[in-house]
Amino acid sequence: MVNDLLELERPLIMGILNVTPDSFSDGGSHTTRGRAVAHALQMIEEGADIIDVGGESTRPGSERVSAEEQIRRVVGIIQALRNTLPEEVPISIDTTLSAVARAAIEAGANILNDVRAGRDDLGMFRLAAEHGLPVILMHMQGTPETMQENPAYEDVVTEIEHFLNERCQAALDVGVKKENIIIDPGIGFGKTQEHNLMLMANLDRFVKSGYPVLLGTSRKRFMGAICPVDTPRELVGATCATTALGVMAGVRIFRVHDVKPNRQAADVTWAIQRI
């Protein structure tokens, strides 16, 4: 299903559906089944290709949420989504814990989105291999609780390239198929503004790895410091700028809150790129 989408070549939009009370931009907005399904349907109507469901906030300073609580938050909503959304729309589970991922798969999820790239729980890779599912491997320096406490690199692009290569190999060693691995440089996760801008300027290096690249910049703080804007919801235009840049660099998937404007930015840039 996901590989079929990737074969279409056009950029894919992953709509964010946080079912958490404390996410940095939309915490508490979609915590009931009805509201979650309605928002997912709206995102599909606006052009989302994938719906990404998360039951644990990874905003800077956030604390861990138990597997049991994540399962309580996400499983019923994923079941409702799978019963409502078109069959061809993949549902991604945003978690670092295999117990949560397994429950989500049983409820109808078919992509694993792991911001810790298997470092918290190698069982994530085993699940991906067992079920033949795509897995997204993201770079994060530190943990959500500590990642913005003076993040440091000697060469941010090269170090993250090496990290993602190592995590891809770890997934391959467990039996995940190469075509089921997607990489994410982790914009905003243990990076300063300068680090994030450097990564954005070098997205093509990650694309050259041969793995599909996911970009997640939606409403992120480093852009607000440039604009300047205090409210994450006011960063739609900034996010669209990064989406256009990503399309030009060859990024395949864009994880966003605001689907319609980013769908437009991606499609227009892709049309120009094909001339």
Image (tube, helix red, strand yellow):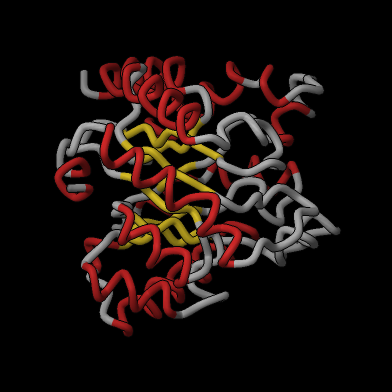
Vertical position of residue 155 compared to residue 75: above or below = below
Residue 272 horizontal/vertical position (percent)? 29, 17
Q: Quadrant of residue 102?
A: bottom left
View extreme (right): residue: 150
- Tell me which residue sits at (32%, 34%) in the image: 12
Q: Residue 239 placed where, x, y %?
A: 56, 26
Q: In terms of depth relative to the viewer, which is nearer, 265 or 258? A: 258
**Residue at the spot x=40%, y=36% of the render?**
14
Please tell me which residue is depicted at 68% across the width and 41% down the height of the picture.
Answer: 21
Q: Is residue 60 left or right of residue 273?
A: right
Q: How many marks?
A: 0
Q: Position of residue 144 (x, y in %)?
A: 72, 58
Residue 62 seen: yes
- Residue 8 point in image, percent of width and height: 16, 36
**Along the line of sight, which residue is nearer the eye, 2 or 245?**
2
Q: Is residue 250 visible?
A: no
Q: Is residue 94 above or below residue 51?
A: below
For this rendering, which residue is in front, 68 or 202?
68
Q: Nearer the viewer, residue 204 or 224?
A: 224
Residue that appears at 55% across and 40% down: 18
Q: Quadrant of the C terminus?
A: top left
Q: Quadrant of residue 112?
A: bottom left
